Image (tube, helix red, strand yellow):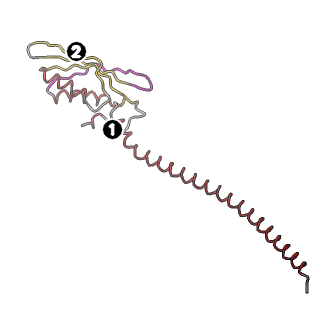
Amino acid sequence: MKSPLAQLAFALALCAAVLGGYGVWYAAIADKSSVAATLENQITAKTEAEGRIASARATLDDIKGDESAVQGYFVSETNIVGFINYLEARGVAQEADVNVLSVSTGGDKAHSTLVVALTARGVFDAVMRAVGAIEYAPYDLSIKTLSVAHENKGTWRADLTLVAGSVPASLATSSSATKKP
């Protein structure tokens, strides 16, 4: 039979071996756990980035229609004649005679504009309605100058200079002035 001291030494050695093995095993698990946590953080970050990218793509798809709608408020360089006809038709609808006298370009490359000089003739109410209809047309328009004069009995004349936002032909969309309501 073995002595109790030998048994105690064997038990202590076995306990030390088990504790050493547990320590090595714990360190390996802790290392793998930190690697797993790092990978989990990377996966979360990539998933969030993917979600933001998908959201940005969806937003871009949503605003494609808005872009063409906004461009519809600008006069295309290729459709100036249609825009002139549109202005004259606004006058006819208000029972005034609207004539476009000149069209010239203005602004800079970033913000190109058209400067349109026109006159409206007729009775006072019709002339003022025509001016209002032109001013509130669905375009990027502003009245630069306006003068109203009484020509003869019952006939009035309004001289206007409009500044209209314009887009180059390369940026123009399928919307045109003749399609406006």
Residue 147 circle label: 2
Determine the secondary structure under disc 2: strand
Residue that extends furthest to the left in the rendered view of this protein = 153
Write the start and end of the magenta stretch as one range. Answer: 95-112
The kind of residue tagged 1 is: Ser
Q: Residues within 10 Å of mark 2 (few under 14, many from 20)?
A: few
Residue 84's spot in the image, x, y percent? 27, 27
17 left or right of 140 in image: right
Q: Is residue 111 magenta?
A: yes
Q: Nearer the viewer, mark 2 or mark 1?
A: 2
| Numbered disc 1: secondary structure | loop
Q: Quadrant of the N terminus?
A: bottom right
Q: Position of residue 85 (x, y in %)?
A: 25, 29
Residue situated in front as seen by the camera: 44 or 95: 44
The front one of 68 and 31 is 31
Task: State the mark number for residue 6.
Answer: none
CB atoms of marks 2 and 1 within 8 Å: no
Q: Does the magenta portion include 135?
A: no
Residue positioned 40% across, 43% down in the render: 64
Total numbered circles: 2
Say which mark, if any, is on residue 175.
1
Residue 120: image quadrant is: top left
Counting from the top left corner in percent of width and height, residue 65 is at 37, 43
